[in-house]
Amino acid sequence: MSSLCGQCGAKGTDISPGEKIMCTSCEQKVDASSANVDTLADDLDKVDLSYDNELFQDPPPREECPICMLPMPHALAACGVEASYMPCCGKTICAGCTMVTMEETEKGNLKDLCPLCRVPAPKSDEELMKRCKKRMQLNDANAFHAMGQQHYLGDWGLPRNAKKAIQLWTKGAELGSCNAHSSLGDQYLIGNRYHEGVEEDPGKAAYHLAIASMGGHEVARYHLGMMDTVIDKMERAMKHFMIAASSGYDKALKKVGEGYKAGHVTKDEYASTLRAYQDSQNEMKSVQRTKAQRQAENERQEMGRSENESEKFRYRKEFDCEVRR
């Protein structure tokens, strides 16, 4: 049986049902019989992933960090840039600025305040939730997404509750959060496999990932490309990968390179994507962000988490039809 890793979707070798394999994408042992590539392909083949021309238009401009004024990716913790949502003022700050603020606070050069609204830093999880709920009362879409993350992972002292996370992400999506749409898309892909939340529904997954992609979400765009790869829609898949790579997403760039070798991408398209990728990376890069990213990667290694878990709600990132690494 040709199986997919139940954690990230990577295809493995022919193995017996129930046998444990090491998934090289997420570096965790999973039950290899939890998904079958042929079944997944059949489900996705029934889904309309084309939508209209809006799906393949250039993504909207990236927002800037309100402190360093450098652009940030639309997806949280993507393209080598970590970011944090501030429930006190509802702003998103890049990890580079957060790191510098913390360092200066520890040195005594700054007070322990939000660097933007100057509200004292929260002293407990309860205070974090209280501030986030206040932002939710103001219909802050990102607040709903952030609270959904905490319920899904069981952070801020909350028990894991995927159903509650779905409710919060749904409201966040209604209010316009592309990150909430991306989270919902992931959940409709994995269904109840890890947490009881929603039934698996490739159609709804494609819809939410498409909305997130049109909002600029680099990882959701990459996932749409992987979905098209599973059903062998390579021309459309490469369009998704080239857009995501041009926005600075390294995993998508790798797929464009593979597409070039396989003849799905022309030499000019590959060269143009490479240039756009480097330009995007240069626009977002700073010494502080690079240092913060390195620190975050070290922390994830210590905690046994993969890079893909840094967004705190992703379990099924890949839909490769090949053995990873």
Image (cartoon, rainbow, N blue to C red):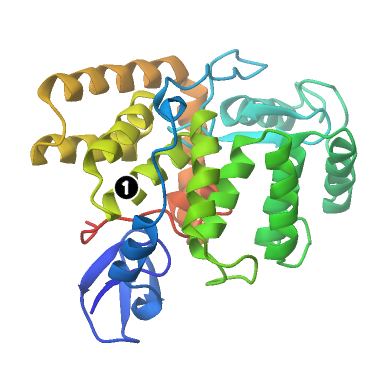
Residue at image position (34%, 56%) is 45
The C terminus: image quadrant: bottom left
The image position of residue 270, as x and y in percent, is 18, 25
Under mark 1, the amino acid is: Asp
Viewer-side residue, 49 vs 36: 49
Q: Residues within 10 Å of mark 1 (few under 14, many from 20)?
A: many
Mark 1 lies on residue: 228
In this orientation, does residue 254 appear? no
Residue at image position (44%, 55%) is 306
Left of 137 or right of it: where is 197? left
The image position of residue 22, as x and y in percent, is 31, 72
Q: Disc 1 on helix, strand or loop?
A: helix
The answer to whether residue 315 is above or below residue 235 is below
The answer to whether residue 186 is above or below residue 2 is above
Viewer-side residue, 317 vs 197: 197
Residue at image position (54%, 53%) is 204
Left of 23 or right of it: where is 114? right
Viewer-side residue, 21 vs 305: 21
